[in-house]
Image (tube, rainbow, N blue to C red):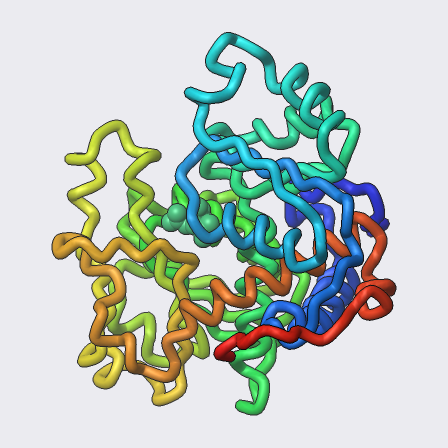
Amino acid sequence: MEFTGSHILSIAQFQRADIERVFQVADTMEPYALRRKVTRVLEGAILGNMFFEASTRTRVSFGSAFNLLGGEVRETTGFKTSAISKGESLFDTARVLSGYSDVICMRHPEAGSVAEFAEGSRVPVINGGDGANEHPTQALLDLYTIRKELAGRGRDIDNLRIAMIGDLKHGRTVHSLCKLLCLFSNIQLILVSPPELAMPESIVEALCAAGHKVQISEDLTESIVSVDIAYSTRIQEERFESKEEADQYRGRFRLNQSIYTQYCEPNTVIMHPLPRDSRACANELDNDLNLNPNLAIFRQADNGVLVRMALFALVLNVADQVDAHARDVIWHTGR
Ligand code: NCD
């Protein structure tokens, strides 16, 4: 794909070579993310960061990634403080805000809304999650994490064995990740969920059409026995009619250290897009896994900055100029 000036709305836009390009640029961002070097390559550029749904890491990591490249961030959070609450359309909002920004990141509760917004925008728009539909940058950072975690273990993305666990119906991160995995070969997926929260049929069909082996299960322990990655997800409470309806599904797929020790291969990597629901009733990923070196959830979050820096650098066409605008960091970084 041509990155320069493009919207990043869906994984459907990417070919395998594009993924390699994103990962290669993300690798070069490490000295900046680790505060060993500073670059000013985007000095003067403005990111419009528009989040109409709850977000901590996606919003802040987009902002941090842009800051780390030397650019500035303007943020809008929630509908209440936006003129959308006065009835303004996404098209008009996009037309206006794209006059104030060089690139816009957006999260919105409705599927398709970010693409609709992009139609009105005069600058590239990056999808930070549109309802239960897609979350392309999360899928890219997840796959980047998978590749990094498996390096040195003689395993790679091709031939990957992965269990996806939890609310696969509403989880946009697993939707985008599955679409991304369709670009690779010979993958074994075990999709673990209650039948009511199963992965959408169209995505299962795409995985099968890509030649992957897909198993559907409701049993966590038998599904995590021979996988490289156990990818857990949160019950997406905000997509249910009521909290009570979501409550029925909590705690069904609890992964803790003793279950891990009993059932997983010794090096199985545990992933989760976060936030993990740490309320007592949730029982997703227990805190006793925190000391497990294969718990990759916080490395995933760190990798989000690298991948988002790479996407900004590619979309704004400065990937080859980052180092030319660099200097060493002079403050104490503690890293
Ligand atoms: C996810 C999301 O918003 O889809 N979070 C994230 O961006 N890392 C997952 C979730 O909210 O459960």
Horizontal side of residue 201 vs 306, given as left or right: left
Horizontal side of residue 316 vs 130, given as left or right: right
Horizontal side of residue 288 vs 109, given as left or right: left
Q: Position of residue 142 (x, y in %)?
A: 53, 63
Q: Position of residue 79 (x, y in %)?
A: 45, 23
Horizontal side of residue 262 vs 117, given as left or right: left
Q: Nearer the viewer, residue 299 or 224?
A: 299
Residue at 75% x, 25% y: name it: 99
The relative height of residue 186 versus residue 41 in the rendered view (above or below) is below
Q: Position of residue 105 (x, y in %)?
A: 62, 40
Residue 161 visible = yes
Residue 199 visible = no
* The quadrant where residue 35 appears: bottom right
Residue at 50% x, 35% y: name it: 51
Residue at 60% x, 37% y: name it: 74
| Tag count | 0
Residue at 54% x, 71% y: name it: 145
Q: Position of residue 130 (x, y in %)?
A: 52, 36
Residue at the limit of the structure toward the top, as seen here: 87
* The quadrant where residue 209 appears: bottom right
The relative height of residue 174 versus residue 149 in the rendered view (above or below) is above
Q: Nearer the viewer, residue 324 or 315?
A: 324
